Image (cartoon, grey):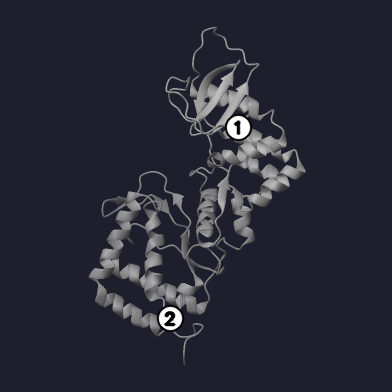
Amino acid sequence: MYHRSQQVKPADYPATFDDRGPGILFAGFQALGSFSHPLVICLHDHRGTDRERNNLFRMDVVKLIGQVAAQLPPDAANAVLRILAGRWYERPRKRYDFQSWYPIIDRLVHRIAACPTQTARFRLDNPHLLVAAQVRRTDLSRYNRRRQALAWIRGSGRRYRLVQEAFRALGYPDLEDACAEAGGFTVTRDPDPDETKRIAILEAVVKTLFSDLLEQIALPPCKVIENPCAAWQGMATCLRNDGTAARWRGLRIRYHLPYVALKAGLLRQDSFGDAVGTYLHELGHSFGGDSSAAFSHALSEMLSATVDHAAQIGGLRRAWDETEGEPGKSS
């Protein structure tokens, strides 16, 4: 492998038709392909099956680059991996993805990992990488942990970067492990007596505004998020309903909620509005995930009803403010 010069290639220079970048691939002493990184890659012992000089398809270019990457010494692998930084988190998009650079990054990382000196050098220059293995939405427990960990990153104040699983060989931790070590995951407990009073008021909000919803579902128990470092203000555990789902105002109730949870700070005297908004948000997950249209529709219905019944909400707010025993309330 060589660094590519700044000289522009002639228009008729051999190129891969769907990847006409500055990179050049020589195979069998012929320029047969191109790619989107400023490198010249040579695999001179390559022997094609056709004597005709045909430009390579992208999948062939990726395959041959992978063969060269597997032979590089650690210092060269280190230099090349940095040039390919935009692909550190690339992964196959389908079961058989022969155009993915995922195996190339894997081979380069493991070549670096074979040398403690190069490993230390790479880690010194890239201290904030976190491994994020692929998580399927159907694995609800792992998917929820991933979402919490990503929320923790956004609020951490540090610019972490996610990378593929191969980087474990260089000693980088998994995203979820780093989040757990920093106390970023939610830790729930049962509410104390004073918190129970305020949760009852939140439930009264729902009973006042959405009695028709309670004909379809039972309100889930509400727990308290103890950890002040947790990324979320609230959370809900969702289990998909089997069989024919009930409906509320035209929306399918897709999930059963074994419980919801609110951060302890929301159950204080001056947090009624935030507590109501978060509580309704979590109940809205009965209809879908954060990015779903059904969830957005359900939340809009709930918030619209809250505005339309301002007088009733005002009475519940006064009851909230009059609740005794919360930390920090003046006597």
Camera sees residue 72: yes
Lateral position of residue 324 relative to residue 162, left or right: left
Q: Is disc 1 placed on a helix, strand or loop?
A: helix
Q: Is residue 224 above or below residue 8?
A: below
- Asked whether 283 or 73 is in front, the reply is 73
Which amino acid, mark 2?
Answer: Gln
Residue 269 is labelled as 2
- Disc number at residue 104? 1
Task: Please state the horizontal and vertical placement of residue 6, each as a whole percent of the image.
Answer: 51, 34
Q: Residue at x 39, y 80 (%)?
A: 320
User: Compared with residue 88, is residue 161 higher up or lower down, i.e. above or below?
Assistant: below
N-terminal of the pair, mark 2 or mark 1, is: 1
Q: CA distance from mark 2 to mark 1?
A: 56 Å
Which residue: 53% across, 41% down? 86
In the rendered image, residue 182, in percent from the top left (x then y), is placed at: 62, 62
Q: Residue at x 54, y 19 (%)?
A: 31
Where's residue 147, x and y in %? Answer: 50, 53
Report x, y in % for residue 50. 54, 8
